[in-house]
Image: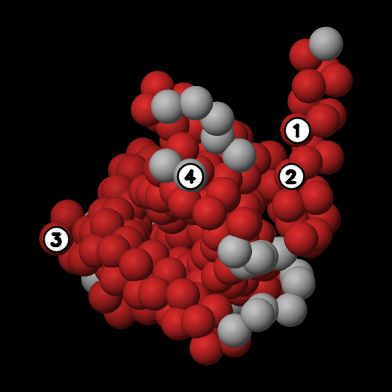
Amino acid sequence: MLFLDALAGFGKYIGMLGSIFAKPQKFSMYWRETLRQMYDIGVGSFWIIAIVGLFIGGVTAVQFSNKLLTFGFIPMWWMGSMTRDSMFLELAPTISALLLAGKIGSNIATELGTMRITEQIDAMDIMGVNTHSFLIAPKILGSLLIVPSLIVTAMLLGTIGGALAGELGGYYTWEEYKYGLQDDFQPQYVRLMFIKSYVFPFIITSIACYKGFYVKGGALQLGKASTDAVVYSSIAVVIANFVVAFLFL
């Protein structure tokens, strides 16, 4: 029974995704809503992504530097390439996505869920508005346009955090770190980061939209839908992270 419910839910989710590709009835309204979503997601999440990215790079550098110092025979400039690759491959895209799942995932589910339980969506359906296209598509498109820039910001600040941690901790100099950053650069790591930068926001926003759009009941169910949006999208991001790494590395 649980399997059948999950299968039915997945089918409904796929159907929702298919319905958002309908031609917008009024393109200017559709585009304005997309820009609003980009602003809310980008500006609303910039500082948390920037601060977390900076300190993740610093923590990575401190922890690995202490480990390398115990070995004693590995040059410390290696920390530059290690921090760079860690930020490209894992820390910037995945940690940022999990943070965004908590922030924008719950916001989107709550916004759509509130519209559903207050019958605003039903009223729009009666007026002939394609609610899937008007309410869901701009959120997904807006996240796909703005989240990659947030992840690039996290990567850049994480790399700077690694340099600052090395200098402040006396583990290595900026020149050593810069040498490590330039050593054995792998372009496919950048491609992998950008693939994740588009896959993860699609997962987060589409699951949040699904949970919010189809919520039934009152405030209690709305809170559960918001929590489910964060939990399910976080789990889906972790699974997608493995799949993308497995396929593209």
Work out how far the residue at label 3 is from the one at label 4, CA to CA, in angstroms: 56 Å
The amino acid type, in three-letter code, at marker 1 is Gly
Callouts 2 and 1 close, C-beta under 8 Å:
yes
Q: Residue furthest top?
A: 1
Above or below 121: residue 228: above
Residue labelled with disc 3: 168
Work out how far the residue at label 3 is from the one at label 2, CA to CA, in angstroms: 49 Å
The amino acid type, in three-letter code, at marker 4 is Glu
Q: Is residue 214 visible?
A: yes
Residue labelled with disc 4: 119
Crowd class of label 4 (few under 14; some 14 to 19; many from 20; radius 10 Å): few
The amino acid type, in three-letter code, at marker 3 is Leu
Label 2: which secondary element: helix
Residue 54 x/y as whole percent = 28, 61
Label 4: which secondary element: loop
Residue 11 x/y as whole percent = 83, 40
Callouts 1 and 4 close, C-beta under 8 Å:
no
Work out how far the residue at label 2 is from the one at label 1, CA to CA, in angstroms: 6 Å
Q: Which mark is residue 9?
A: 1
In screen coordinates, is 84 left or right of 9? left
Label 1: which secondary element: helix
